[in-house]
């Protein structure tokens, strides 16, 4: 399969067999064709091999309507409709006076589930005196590993369990 679509192995990581899930038995199911076309277009654009090109993400924030200030992780209403099926990459950070944003965590997955779990994670509870802000972007699953890898390598989060082994995919930052 990787001989026919070598960019998949590169995109999904050398230790990953996720392309087998995407393309079982070397056959491309009809439902996966649009995703494969998107991956081909992304690879053809040279973003995988050219560090000067980046994928432009549409970063989302929760803000207070009246003031426009960001809502902290502890105060986000995760029952809002836009969290129902949101899946992609995210950044959790706090603002410092002199050094700008300090990244606490980057990750990927279902945004609602991840944010909810961090509210009870002792590592985040230790930062409860800080106003932890969040930003997330919807990204298709095959690109999430590469984007998380780039964000982790670039932002150096304080809480970092592991990062995927996929090839980093450069993206714009939310700030």
Image (cartoon, rainbow, N blue to C red):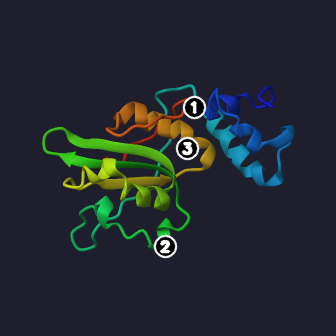
Q: How many marks?
A: 3
Q: CA distance from mark 1 to mark 2?
A: 31 Å
The residue identified by callout 2 is 81
| Figure quadrant of residue 36 | top right
Q: Which residue is mark 3?
A: 144
Q: Is residue 155 left or right of residue 12?
A: left
- In the rendered view, tell whether residue 144 sits above or below residue 115: above
Residue 104 location (% of width, % of height): 32, 44
In the shown orientation, is residue 146 left or right of residue 28?
Answer: left
Q: Residue at x 82, y 42 (%)?
A: 24
> Where is 69 relative to 96, above or below?
below
Of pointers 3 and 1, the one earlier in the residue sequence? 3
Q: Which residue is mark 1?
A: 166
Task: Answer few, some or many: residues within 10 Å of disc 3's Cα (few below 14, many 20 plus, some between 14 and 19).
Answer: many
The vertical placement of 166 against 114, above or below, is above
Q: Position of residue 171 (x, y in %)?
A: 46, 40
């Amino acid at each position: 399969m990787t001989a026919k679509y070598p960019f998949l192995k590169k995109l999904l990581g050398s230790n990953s067999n996720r392309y087998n899930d995407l393309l079982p038995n070397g056959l491309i199911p009809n439902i996966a064709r649009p995703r494969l076309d998107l991956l081909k277009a992304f690879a053809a654009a040279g973003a995988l091999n050219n560090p000067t090109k980046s994928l432009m993400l549409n970063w989302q924030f929760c803000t207070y309507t009246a003031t426009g200030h960001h809502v902290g992780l502890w105060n986000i209403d995760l029952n809002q409709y836009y969290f129902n099926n949101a899946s992609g990459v995210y950044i959790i950070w706090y603002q410092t006076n002199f050094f700008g944003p300090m990244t606490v965590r980057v990750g990927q997955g279902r945004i609602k589930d991840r944010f909810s779990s961090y509210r009870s994670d002792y590592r985040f509870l230790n930062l409860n005196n800080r106003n932890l802000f969040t930003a997330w972007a919807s990204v298709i699953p095959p690109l999430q590993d590469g984007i998380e890898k780039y964000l982790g390598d670039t932002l150096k989060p304080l809480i970092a369990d592991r990062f995927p082994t996929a090839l980093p995919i450069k993206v714009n930052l939310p700030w």
